Image (spheres, rainbow, N blue to C red):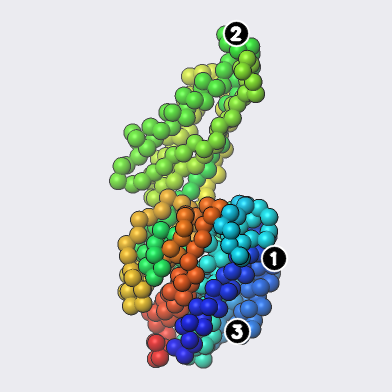
Amino acid sequence: MTIDNKILEDKLAQIRHQLHQHPELSSQEHQTTLFLNSYLETLGYRIVTPQTLLTGVIAEIGPSDSKIIIGLRSDIDALPITEKTGLTYASVNEGVMHACGHDFHMASLLGAAELLAEHANKLTGRIRLIFQPAEETHVGAQAVVEAGGIENLNAIIGFHNKPDLKVNEIGILTGGLMAAVDQFKVSFRGQGTHAAMPQLGNDPIVALTNTVNTLQTIVSRRTDPQSPVVVSVTHIDGGSTWNVLPETAWFEGTVRSFDQSSRQLARKQFYQIVNGQAETFGLSVDISWIEGPDVVDNDIVLTPIVMEETKKHAKLITPKPSNAGEDFAYFSQKIPSVFAFIGSSGTTDWHHDDLIVDDRGLLPAAKWYFYTANRLLEYFGGKTLNDR
Ligand code: NI
């Protein structure tokens, strides 16, 4: 490569700082979109963003008549968190922060864009960069799919920065890397009454607390201990004062799982327990269940190829799967994909208001995109770049 590593490293750090300073919430990434557009246009990319995609950018490079197309994905949205890093380039958008490192992802993919542009006339297939909106709300990847953004791709790769991995460490494994996400909300309706005369009403609070405890038996007694499942009730509410039993009480939370049978079993058990408790206490109940992204499932054929390539340029490790979700799963379900964890030597973890990631992780991430994309072009029929 002719581009100087140090110059590129500094440039990517600058880009990340700029993006970090101007974070935007999911589906509102308008300035970010403008920035990415103009950056990619300057590098000579064809902007192919479908009109129906309101934020986010899709751009291509390489021979436009090639049938081989590899997708590289970065997410672009930030979180409703007030930043407490004290950085000179801290967020200027009050209450909004790149607390998941999607600024890191964008800067890395722009770094790969630079390297690809430098080799543009040698590319033997097309590379499609997908800067996807609204990952945090789990609607962005679906929007890209519905807009036709992954049509004709042979494969797609992506990564999430991992604060607990060191710079230059890259974690990849075949199969489930990140969990399937389900979200639930349950409302019990009984009959309100004076706290001193419970026999005159029907108390939803006792039913709710029984239910919350019983739900823990899904994991301890029902699902296969070899396949991780998490059931977390995260928010409960009912009543408004000390001497009145309320009419309603509700709770919400999430289920995480790593395979379809556990996912279905947990849901079935959940409904059985909640409906059973409602019947036991003679209450009516309303259950709402929102299916989030599926497991991020790394392709059985492509993953070993990507791992082999990764080993040449970074320290490849076997990561612990994460119970967090990733809407990259909507791509994984449609086309062969590989998702990685790339070390960012963070000060804390994802979604913390004081998370600072290490800029020295940007260049290894950019190169991972670049080398892996080329390796996959080669796998799907293109030729190897001769000056790697
Ligand atoms: Ni994230």
- Type of residue at label 1? His
- Looking at the image, can residue 277 be seen? yes
Dot 1 or dot 3: first in sequence order is 1
Write the residue at 46% across / 83% down. 5
Name the residue that disc number 2 marks.
197
Contact between labelled residues 3 and 2, with CB atoms less than 8 Å apart: no
Dot 3 amino acid type:
Leu
Between 33 and 285, the one lying in front of the other is 33
- Pick the residue in front: 155 or 352: 352
Which residue matches tag 3? 43
**Residue displayed at 42% across by 65% down:** 343
In which quadrant will I find the C terminus?
Answer: bottom left
Earlier residue among tags 2 and 1 = 1
Give the CA separation, mark 1 to mark 3.
20 Å
Residue at mark 1? 30
The amino acid type, in three-letter code, at marker 2 is Met
Q: Considering the numbered disc 3 on the image, is that residue within a helix, a strand or a loop? A: loop
* Circle 2: element type: loop
